[in-house]
Amino acid sequence: MKITRTRVAAFGVVVVLAVFAAVAAIRWPEEQPVAEVVREPAVLAAPADGAFRHPGVLVGADDLGLVKERVAEGAEPWASAFAQMKGTRYGDADWQPDPRAVVECGPYSNPDLGCVDEAEDGVAAYTQALLWNLTGEEKHALAAIRIIDAWAGVLERHTNVNGPLQAAWSAVPMVRAAELIRYSYGGWDPAPAEAMFRDVYLPEVIDGATWTNGNWELIMMEAATGIAVFLDDRATWDRAVERFRGRIKAYIYLESDGTLPVAPPGETNVPEERLISYWHGQRDLRDGVTQETCRDFGHAGWGLSAASHVAETARLQGLDLWSEIAPRMTAALNLHMPYALGEKAPSWLCDGEPDTESYAPLPEAARHHLVDRLGLALPSTTAYVQRYRPAEAAYFFAWETVTHGG
């Protein structure tokens, strides 16, 4: 599968990884019931002084050390995924950024004034930071710094309809890169990057986007939590986590929510028809349906991916958000994965014709936690991940088979 350079679309572009073969005859083993997901919260002690752990945005030092060992041993899936990452254009240490002061992203990326350039520079910076940490080759650290500093030196704002989402897309990989470089490479002055994240990106993402499709706000909160860690900003962290908690309940439905889905954060007494319309006409609500399932599986996958990233960063910071979201996340994966693999959808779901072929990206982080750490049986999720590995990169997701392959 190959992701090409695409234009940024309004309200989120579906990254179509491939058209999956229709294999309607496949029937996967019964999934783990939602009720069995509930576990005692993990004992994850935060530092005594309440400080943030570094590096601590999506991947930590222990994670990277383990991956480095696995790659050196030639163990799979890490070795192949690492080779793929290093061999892409994002892995080229000569990558040259293309920054600008104002990034304007209109409806369906019309106009596209720096949108794709900024997003791709973010992915490249993160790729270079990972390569530096996994290979020790200084050229990769210098490449990551060159990209981050180029944008920090000029970026002022994002404009037009897709501006807030564009800011989130780009901040997510850029702040991961900055966090990794800051705590692995001496001699870099992070002050310009701090100013960029604090003064440009953060104001554009921290308030969320209440009535846009939910993947927007989940990606925004991924950006905000990452920025909070990088800036050691506890107030921003608390605010972003609170917003995330509200949005995840309003994004993945459980029957315990009642006959209607939970309204977006801060909204009360929302008319039934408005909620159903917001859920793209899906009236038959069952465990695991997301607010974007009947829009298309691609955007639903983006929302689930961002949610898993927030939970992973929180885990590194001593906050067990996974315990809170595991029932919803497991229900969502149970629902979507069989149809993404080719099983025919039932008539009650999106009138029997959901757009299942666009599911992306691979749910590596969620599978890793739920299956490898908690020991849950998610056969169709595991089958899907194994079929389409290694994970690729675009916008706010990148190389998760390398970082979360097992």
Image: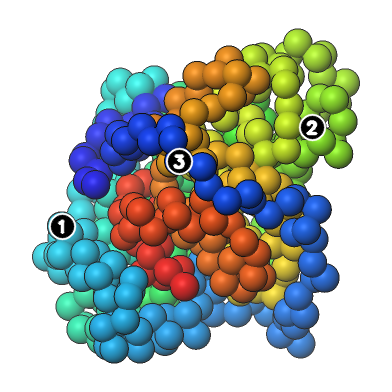
Image side of residue 319 versus residue 403, left or right: right
- Mark 3 or mark 2: which is in front? 3
Depicted 9 relative to depicted 359: above or below = above
- Report helix, strand or loop for mark 3: loop
Viewer-side residue, 31 vs 303: 31
Going by the numbered disc 1, the residue's amino acid type is Arg
Question: Residue visible at 28% across and 67% down?
Answer: 81
Asked if residue 41 lies left or right of residue 248, the reply is right
Residue 1 spot, x, y in % from top left:
24, 47
Q: Quadrant of residue 215?
A: top right
Q: Residues within 10 Å of mark 2 (few under 14, many from 20)?
A: many
- Residue 262: which numbered mark, if any? 2
Kind of residue sitting beneath label 3: Ile
Question: Which residue is more in the foreground, 346 or 328?
Answer: 346
Q: Which residue is mark 1?
A: 89
At which x and y percent is residue 178?
40, 68
